[in-house]
Image: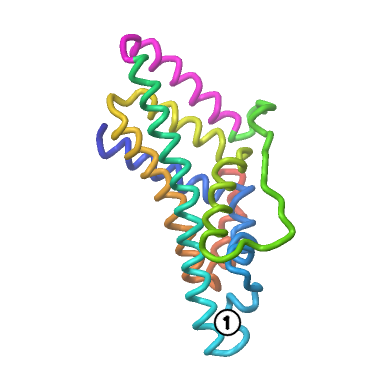
């Protein structure tokens, strides 16, 4: 596996972050996992509160990122293990994988819809998560349940991971994907006030994305 493959996986994570059913909900996720209102996260209640809120949001976001990263990396390891059994048919599987990735790409672009990729399963709880463990559990739920936008992209990365020669390569691939999704999430937590300006700009280009 080369650096270009890892860079592509990282880029896929970034694309998942800016997808239309993930990016608009990021402030809501940050509020939910941190237990703070949007006004508190933006420092609207005074300097002392803003400093405490900032640390709380950053720690909660790291726990959330850890949660979904654990799931994605585990999926990458599993895909690689299965892929080892298919190495004898690598050329055929490569062609099949190429067709699948193209189909998932067309689905994501809206050229046509694949019904089962639009299904989703989410945890729904009235209470906010408790502490960092709760934030990590929400991250795990996010990884398993938020399929309409990240599902086709993630499936493409897992298909590539299944073709890797070792489990370690599959883990690296999904770690790069998790990093691509996690870095902008943490950056948003770090500079929440700038998020809304960036979101307004990105939203104007959603059709192209």
On the image, which quarter does residue 79 sit in? Answer: top left
Residue 47 left/right relative to 114: left
Q: Nearer the viewer, residue 117 or 68?
A: 68
Q: Is disc 1 surrounded by few (<14), some (14 to 19) or many (20+) residues within 10 Å?
A: some
Residue position marked by numbered label 1 in the rendering? 43
Residue 6 position within the rendered picture, expressed as x and y whole percent measured from the top left: 32, 40
Which quadrant would the N terminus be assigned to in this image?
top left
Residue 117 position within the rendered picture, expressed as x and y whole percent measured from the top left: 63, 30
Question: Residue drawn at (63%, 73%), measured in percent from left and top?
Answer: 36
Question: Residue drawn at (58%, 47%), measured in percent from left and top?
Answer: 142
Residue 135 position within the rendered picture, expressed as x and y whole percent measured from the top left: 55, 59
In magenta stretch: residue 174: no
Residue reaching furthest right?
Answer: 126
Residue reaching furthest left?
Answer: 2
- The relative height of residue 146 versus residue 92 in the rendered view (above or below) is below
Q: Secondary structure at mark 1?
A: loop
Which quadrant would the C terminus be assigned to in this image?
top right
Question: Residue drawn at (53%, 30%), measured in percent from left and top?
Answer: 105
- The relative height of residue 71 versus residue 135 in the rendered view (above or below) is above
Residue 41 position within the rendered picture, expressed as x and y whole percent measured from the top left: 58, 75
- Asked whether residue 200 appears in the rendered view, the answer is no
Residue 150 left/right relative to 25: left
In magenta stretch: residue 94: yes
Question: Residue drawn at (46%, 48%), measured in percent from left and top?
Answer: 14
Q: Which SS does the magenta portion mostly show?
A: helix
**The magenta stretch spans which residues?**
87-107
Q: Nearer the viewer, residue 127 or 19?
A: 127
On the image, which quarter does residue 151 sit in? Answer: top right
């Amino acid at each position: 596996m080369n650096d270009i493959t890892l860079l592509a996986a990282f880029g896929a994570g970034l694309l998942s972050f800016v997808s239309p059913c993930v990016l608009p909900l990021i402030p809501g996720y940050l509020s939910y996992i941190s237990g703070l209102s949007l006004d508190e996260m933006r420092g609207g209640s005074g300097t002392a509160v803003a400093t405490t809120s900032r640390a709380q949001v950053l720690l909660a976001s790291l726990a959330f990122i850890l949660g979904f990263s654990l799931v994605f990396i585990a999926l990458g390891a599993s895909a690689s293990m299965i892929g080892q059994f298919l190495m004898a048919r690598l050329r055929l599987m490569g062609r099949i994988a190429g067709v699948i990735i193209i189909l998932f790409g067309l689905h994501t672009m809206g050229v046509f819809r694949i019904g089962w990729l639009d299904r989703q399963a989410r945890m729904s709880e009235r209470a906010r998560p408790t502490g960092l463990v709760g934030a990590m559990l929400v991250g795990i739920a996010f990884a398993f349940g938020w399929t309409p936008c990240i599902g086709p992209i993630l499936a493409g990365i897992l298909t590539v991971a299944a073709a890797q020669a070792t489990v370690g390569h599959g883990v690296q691939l999904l770690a790069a994907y998790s990093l691509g999704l996690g870095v902008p999430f943490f950056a948003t937590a770090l500079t929440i006030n700038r998020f809304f300006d960036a979101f307004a700009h990105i939203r104007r280009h959603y059709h192209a994305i």
